[in-house]
Amino acid sequence: MRFLDVFVSVVGLLLLFPIIIIISILIKLTSDGPVIFSHLRVGKHGKEFKCYKFRSMVTGADKIGGYMTKVNDSRITPIGRFIRKYSIDELPQLFNVIKGDMSLVGPRPDTPMQMKLYTKEQWKARHKVRPGITGLAQVKARHTATNKMRLKYDLFYVKNRSLFFDIYLVYKTLLNLIFKKSY
C-alpha cells in the first residue's frame, strides 16, 4: 500500500498545485507568519515527526490560547476558517505521506502528550501503522469523537485494515467534505 500512498500523493500534489499556490498566496497576504505550520506528532512504532499543515491560525496561537481550538476561536484567521472547513489545511500532509511519516488512511497522528490518554498496550497497538490524513474516526465522527470513541475506531481500523477498507474510507471522506462541510 506504500506505493499507492506515494503515487496518489504525487498525483494529488500535481493536480492540486494551482490550489496550493493560491492558498499559499492568500495566507501570506492576509496574515503575518509562515505559510506552512509544522508540529510534532507520533507515527508508526512511536517515531516522532514534523507534521505539516497550512497555517490557519495567527502566529503563536498556542501561546495565546493553548493547544485545542474552540468553536469561533478568535485565533483562526479568515482564510484559516475557509481552509479548515474544507480540510484544505491538510494538503501539505501529502508531503508527509511521500516522506513516509504518514499514510493517506490511518489513525490521525497523536501529539506526544496524548500518550497519557492511552494504556501502554493501546498506545502500542494504535501505532502499529502509519498515521493517516483521514481515517475511520474522521469518517464516523469527524469533529465530535471523544477520545474513547476515537481510540475504538482507530484500534478497529488497525485490526481490520485492507486496501478495500482504505478505498472505502477515502470515498466516505470525500462525501463528508462535499456534503457535510462542518467546522
Image: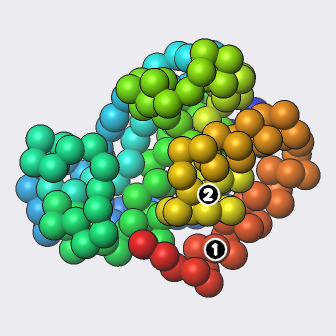
Judging by the rendered image, the residue that carries numbered circle 2 is 138
Residue at the location (73% across, 60% down)?
170
Can you say which quadrant of the picture contains the C terminus? bottom left
Can you say which quadrant of the picture contains the N terminus? top right
Q: Is residue 32 left or right of residue 41?
A: left
Chain-order first, disc 1 or disc 2: 2
From the top left corner, tell me how far across and down residue 131 is, in percent: 61, 35
Amino acid type, mark 2: Gln
State the residue lying farthest toward the bottom: 179
From the top left corner, tell me how far across and down residue 15 is, in percent: 58, 63
Indicate which disc residue 148 carries: none
From the top left corner, tell me how far across and down residue 5 is, in percent: 71, 42
Measure the C-alpha gap from mark 1 to mark 2.
Answer: 9 Å
Q: Quadrant of residue 20?
A: bottom left
Amino acid type, mark 1: Asn
Judging by the rendered image, the residue that carries numbered circle 1 is 176
- Dot 1 surroundings within 10 Å: few (below 14), some, or many (20 or more)? some
Q: Is residue 85 above or below residue 139?
A: below
Q: Are marks 1 and 2 in contact (CB under 8 Å)?
A: yes
